[in-house]
Image (spheres, grey):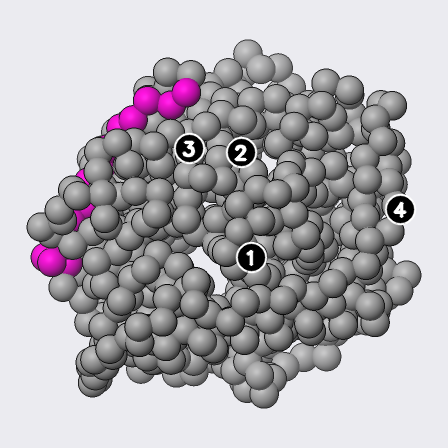
Amino acid sequence: MYRIALVLVFIFTTSSMTPAQQKPLQYPQALKTEHSDTYFGTKVADPYHWLEDDTSSATAKWVEAENKVTFGYLDQIPYRGALAKRLEQIYNYPKYSTPSRKGEYYFFSKNDGLQNQSVLYIQKGLEGKPEVFFDPNALSPDGTVRLGASSISNDTKYWGYGLSSGGSDWLEINVMEIATRKKLTDRLRWVKVSGISWYKDGFFYSRYPAPPDTTKLLSAKNENHQVFYHKLGTDQSKDELIFEDSKNPQRFHIVSVTDDERFLILSISDRGKGKDGNALYVRDLAKGQKDFTKIIGEFDHDFSVLDNLGDKLLVQTNYKAPNQRVLLIDPAKSSENDWKEVLPEKPEPLISAGTAGGKLFAVYSKDVSHRVYVYDTSGKLENEVQLPAIGTVSGFGGERDDKEVFFTFTSFTFPPTIYRYNLASKQSSLFRASEVSFKPEDYETKQLFFTSKDGTKVPMFVVHKKGLKLDGQNPTLVYGYGGFNVSLFPGFSPLRIAWLEQGGVFVQVTLRGGGEYGEKWHEQGMKLKKQNVFDDFIGAAEYLIKERYTSSAKLAMQGGSNGGLLVGAVLCQRPELFKVALPAVGVMDMLSFHKFTIGWNWIADYGSAESTEAEFKYIYGYSPLHNLKQGVSYPATMVTTADHDDRVVPAHSFKFAATLQERHKGENPVLIRIATKSGHGASNTKKSLEETADVYAFTMWNLGMQPKF
């Protein structure tokens, strides 16, 4: 499975040049305007507001000038090329997804090593010969068209699939006939935040109305999310409108159909109004219901339908259970008193649950590591699935007649490995091992707990070579996220090997705002408690320095998206604590994030500067763009973003970088790297490798490392 056919070792002797001896940087002069906005009587200047127009010639010239400075700097790093080759070697091994079954077919994706996109394979039975089913690499010469939503019809005749281009979140849905591999004429556009839910001779999906100007997608408002039913063989203009709520244009409307096509489930969220949960409605398709029946009408808690047991629904929720539980709900009975508790809340958070083969699989988190239990559908515990080590699992879903299920296990030094679990014997067996060239016995992982500013105990994982000396001289990369109930569990990254093998220490902090310890942990890092996230991250850095793992001169911080906000905020609050800062696709303008594309969706976690004066003052107090100070020596910083990011639009990074370059005082470089034909993350393998090489080279160079490859 995971293999490097040939390992070449590059021995590189660095030159005597130091970062300070590189050519002095001349940053592009960015035009400043008098633009400002007023919030509750406070006038806030926004001199680089013009950079929000990503299609203007002025912005294009600024981007070109910034990239010229950035790549000119990177070109001077003597080992950058050797590092790029080493990353390519490490990454060049086969990577497989967990297989899934539908009828007589098994599906899985595979990347031979350096393919820009993974290829989808099909085979009849587990003993059948795998065949290429769909290869996204054939769709574009630059390999930036990728597969998004994917769904097999219940009769296994058709496959619905969504494609995105250049890193965009917009999908175009197409349909293929499975037996013949023939692409049908169906073509559905302007799809976003949607699945493909088959029913009879078509499927349900969600979309937005076409933007008024399709050349300016990054400035388009994503509003009025609609649900349609598409009948195969018809034009999209003929699709039946199933649901919309134009009076509440910033709500998501997402539908799914139970496997037996009995129920149509409608989940509605109202995150633009600061609500963090979802309402739940259902239509009994078997009874021909035309209107949705309300199960839950409020938006304060999460409700997710796992499956149906006849005329009742299995629902995972945090309602009256911050750590989640599973209920059995009869849609015909509206009273909460009629709900039956299948899996009661436990001290450990329920991370996910799913059904397969008539069993209920539940994944719990115990001190940021997964535990898996098997129950019957009434909630009776049958057994625990034994895992090979402390780490993270995915999979366990399947069909109702499955006799076995598959899952993938991974940890920081345990490459992704696929196992086969037999429901009858209750035993797991190795299905597909990793072939990556990596010796886990050379490394160790520790979970440490430190005390944050307010006295909260916060864990973090520390990964490094065995025999590490605690002398304060170890180059250390600290990574975090801390938001949106997103949990960071132990996971393997082949590209991280290039950092670890050079003596680097990797640290992953379990920040509040995530879901590792349930909803209460999440709530302690959202809205008017967001500062806890930054304090946790700062506390982790201070602990590492105190325990002599590293020092400020050897310390780098990294985060993306909400984690980019984290890095930006900590850079502003404690610029002396870190030597290197790596904010990627970050939410940097916290006063106006909700005005771009899907940004209003984040109000549920952040609040809004336009909501109340209290929220404005709090957000204004930590917004990275608005807290950069004149004349401060900031860490060596490389902001990364992409021209096609329509989730966190590049204007956030553009304005932050321009302001940072204007106000920074000192010898540390402050750069912005702007990828093309990429989005919220690299759009293909080639771009991912190139960006990682540049980020690591920049980090190693500014931490004074002398790597040997």
Callout 3: SS:
helix
On screen, residue 708 versus residue 175, left or right, reads left
On screen, residue 311 versus residue 397, left or right, reads right
Which residue matches tag 2? 573
Q: Give residue 566's position: percent from left, percent from top.
A: 52, 40
What label does residue 538 carry, if any? 3
Callout 4: SS:
loop
Circle 2: residue type: Gln
Find the distance from the CA under tag 4 to the CA under tag 1.
Answer: 24 Å
Callout 1: SS:
strand
Q: Give residue 162's position: percent from left, percent from top.
A: 62, 67
Find the distance from the CA under tag 4 to the CA under tag 2.
Answer: 26 Å
Residue in view at x 72 percent, y 18 percent = 614
Callout 2: SS:
helix
Circle 4: residue type: Glu
Circle 1: residue type: Val
Task: Select label 2 or label 3 by which is in front.
Answer: 2
Which residue matches tag 4? 34
Q: Residues within 10 Å of mark 1 (few under 14, many from 20)?
A: many
Task: Select label 1 or label 3 by which is in front.
Answer: 1
User: Could you tell which of marks 4 and 2 lies nearer the N-terminus?
Assistant: 4
656 shown above or below 22: above
> What stretch of residues is rendered in magenta?
440-453
Task: Select label 3 or label 4 by which is in front.
Answer: 4
Residue 640 picture quarter: bottom right
516 shown above or below 102: above
Circle 3: residue type: Ile
Which residue matches tag 1? 670
Residue in view at x 78 percent, y 25 percent = 611
Q: Is residue 233 visible?
A: yes
Residue in view at x 82 percent, y 40 percent = 45
User: Could you tell which of marks 4 and 1 lies nearer the N-terminus?
Assistant: 4
